[in-house]
Amino acid sequence: MKSNAIRHRVRAFAARWLVPYLPYPHFMCVAPLDAVLRVLWRAEGRLPPVYWPRLMLLFLISGINTIASLPERVILGAWLRLRPPRMEPDNAPVFVLGYFRSGTTFLQNLLSADPDLRSPGWPQVLAPQTFVLGWALLRYLFVPLLPLTRLDAVVPVGARLPAEDDFALNNLGGMSILAGRAVLPRRQAFFNRYQDLDSLSAQELNRWRSHQLAFVQKLTLVAGGRRLLLKSPSHTARVRHLLELFPGAKFVHISRPPEAVFRSNLVLTRELQRAFALQPPLPEHEQEEIIASEYLATEMHYLADRTRIPAADLAEVRLQDLIADPTGEMKRIYRELGLPFSQGCEERMLQVAATFGKQPRNRHPDLTEGQKARLARLEPLASNFGHVPALPPGRSILTANRALDDMAS
C-alpha cells in the first residue's frame, strides 16, 4: 500500500511539473524558421526558461524543414504568381462555419466523405509551404514526429483526416488566433484580432488575404478538379472577406447549445496550452472571459453577415439534429446548396457518423457563479439558432442544455 501511494505521488508530481514542459515536436515544427520567428517575435521576450527545452526542439526541427522546404517555396511560389489556378464561381470552396466545439469537425468529416469534395489533410495544413514537392521527402522524416497524438486529445487527427486551414495560416506566419490561444497565451489580445479581421491594419489584412488565397490556390493544384472543402471556426467571423476572395463560395453553419460550446472550449484551450504553449496560461477567469466574449462576437458577426450570402449558397444545421438524423440532414443541406448527393455519399457518411458516435464524451464539473454569469450573456445565440427549449416550470436554460453537453464536436 505504501509503495502504491509513493508511485501515485510521483506520477502526480510528474504530471503537474514535468510533463507540461517536456520537449516533444510542436505543431509548428514543420513550419520554416521565418514563420516560427514571426510568431515568437510577438512574445516580446517573455518566454520563461521552463519552456526553453520545448523551444529548442522547435528551432531544431524547424531549421531542418526550412532547408527542405526552400525548393518548393521558390519554384512553386513563382509558378503560382505566374500562372495562378482559375477558380470559377461554380467551383468555389465550401466553407464549414461555427465556433470551436460546435460540431464543425463532425460536419467537415461528413462532407469529406463526398468524393466530389477535397478537404486539406493535417500534413497539408501543418506544412503549408512544402506539401506538394517537398512532402515526398518530409513524409519520411517528419510524419513520425508530427504532433498528431497531442492534438488528438482535443480533436480527431490523423494523416488522412480533414484538417482546419487556420493551422496553415498560423504556420505561414502567425495569421491566426491559434498563435495566441495555443502558443503564446499571454499575447492573445494581439493574435485574436485575426478572428474577425476588423482591427487589422491595411497591411496586415492584405497579408492575411494574400496568404489565404495562396493556400487555397495551392490546394487547387492537388485537388484534381474537385471543389475544396474548408473548415476553420474563425471563418465564421470572416464571411464578408471570404465572399470577396471567393465569389460563389457556399457556406454551411452548424450550431450547438451555448453551454456545451462554452464548457468544451474551456477543455480545448486548457489542453492546447498544456501541449503547445511557450508561456504560462492566463488566470482561469481571464481565459473564460476571452472565450465567452469571442464566442458571442464570432457568431454575432455571422448573424450580421449571413444576409450577404445568396440563399442558394447557405445552409444551417443544429448539431443535435445532425446526430439524430445524419442522412436526412445531409440530404437537406445538399438540396439547399444545390450540390449532387450520390448513393456512395450516403454510405460513407453513415460510416463517419458511426465512427464519431463511438468517441468518448467529456464530463465537466459544475459551473461556477462566474461561468454562469458569462454563459447568461450567450442566451441570444441560443434563441437565434433555435436552442431555446420549451421549459417546464422551475427549469432553467442552463439545466435544459446540460443533456446536450457531451455531444461529439
Image: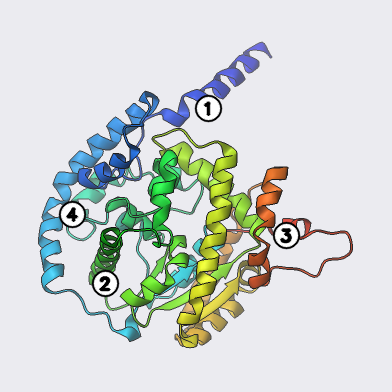
Where does label 2 land, which residue?
220
The location of residue 395, given as percent across then percent down, is 84, 59
* Badge 2: residue crowd in 10 Å (few <14, some 14–19, many ≥20): many
User: In the rendering, which numbered label is found on residue 134?
Assistant: 4
Give amino acid for label 4.
Gly
Three-letter amino acid code at the position of disc 3: Asn
| Measured Cα–Cα span from mark 2 to mark 1 | 43 Å
Circle on res. 401: 3
Q: Is residue 74 above or below residue 314?
A: above
Dot 1 corresponds to which residue? 15
Marks 3 & 2, CB-CB < 8 Å contact: no
Q: Closer to us: mark 3 or mark 4?
A: 3
- Residue 349 visible in the current orientation: no
Is label 2 in a helix, a strand or a loop?
Answer: helix
- Whole-percent x and y of residue 251? 46, 76
Which residue appears at 39% of the width and 57% of the height?
Answer: 194
Residue in the foreground of this view, choosing between 378 and 105? 378
Under mark 2, the amino acid is Thr
- Dot placed on the residue nearer the N-terminal end, 3 or 2: 2
Q: Furthest-top residue in view?
A: 2
Give above or below for 323 relative to 57. below
Q: Is residue 292 left or right of residue 396?
A: left
